[in-house]
Image (cartoon, helix red, strand yellow):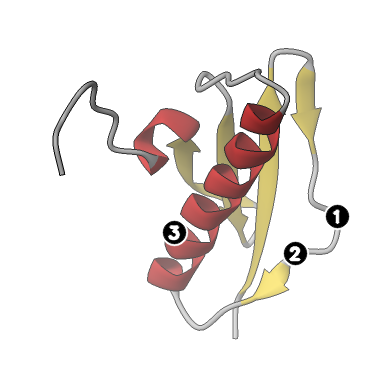
Amino acid sequence: MPRYYFNIADASGLVLDDEGVELSDDGEARAMAVTGARDIVATEAMIGQVDLSWHIDVMRDGALLFRLPFADAFELSEGSAR
């Protein structure tokens, strides 16, 4: 199985994932990146700070596979009734 690395970029720089995780495919890596972005934003929201300009660089075999902007992990709306 391929090993994926999830490097997180924020306003102060890049936090490298030195361990990575083995996943079955790129789709599973994308799902993990989305979940990771949502978890980080949820934690930040608890202290009243949300910065959707951050992103996660997903690496495989030493190359950038894709970049997930945190904003892409959410569907934002205002005032919609459920």
Please give the label number shown on residue 18.
1
Q: What distance separates the C-alpha of mark 2 from that of mark 3? A: 14 Å
As drawn, 28 above or below 51 = below
Q: Hey, what amino acid is under mark 3? A: Arg
- In three-dimensional space, the C-alpha distance between marks 3 and 1, rounded to whole angstroms, equals 18 Å
Q: Are marks 3 and 1 in contact (CB under 8 Å)?
A: no
The reply to whether discs 1 and 2 touch (Cβ–Cβ < 8 Å) is yes
- The three-letter amino acid code for the residue at tag 2 is Gly
Q: Which residue is mark 3?
A: 30
Q: Residues within 10 Å of mark 2 (few under 14, many from 20)?
A: some
Identify the element where label 1 is drawn: loop
Q: Tags 2 and 3 in contact by the CB under 8 Å rule? A: no
2, 28: nearer the viewer: 28
The residue singled out by tag 2 in the image is 20
Q: Residue 25: x percent and y percent?
A: 45, 76
Q: Residue at x 52, y 56 (%)?
A: 35
Residue 63 as seen in the image, left or right of residue 72: right
Seen as rendered, the residue at the extreme front is 81
Within-10-Å neighbours for mark 1: few <14, some 14–19, many 20+? few
Furthest residue toward top: 11
Q: In terms of secondary structure, where does tag 3 sit?
A: helix
When asked about the image quadrant of residue 46, the answer is top right
Quarter of the N terminus within the rendering: bottom right
Residue at 57% of width from left, 18% of height from top? 51
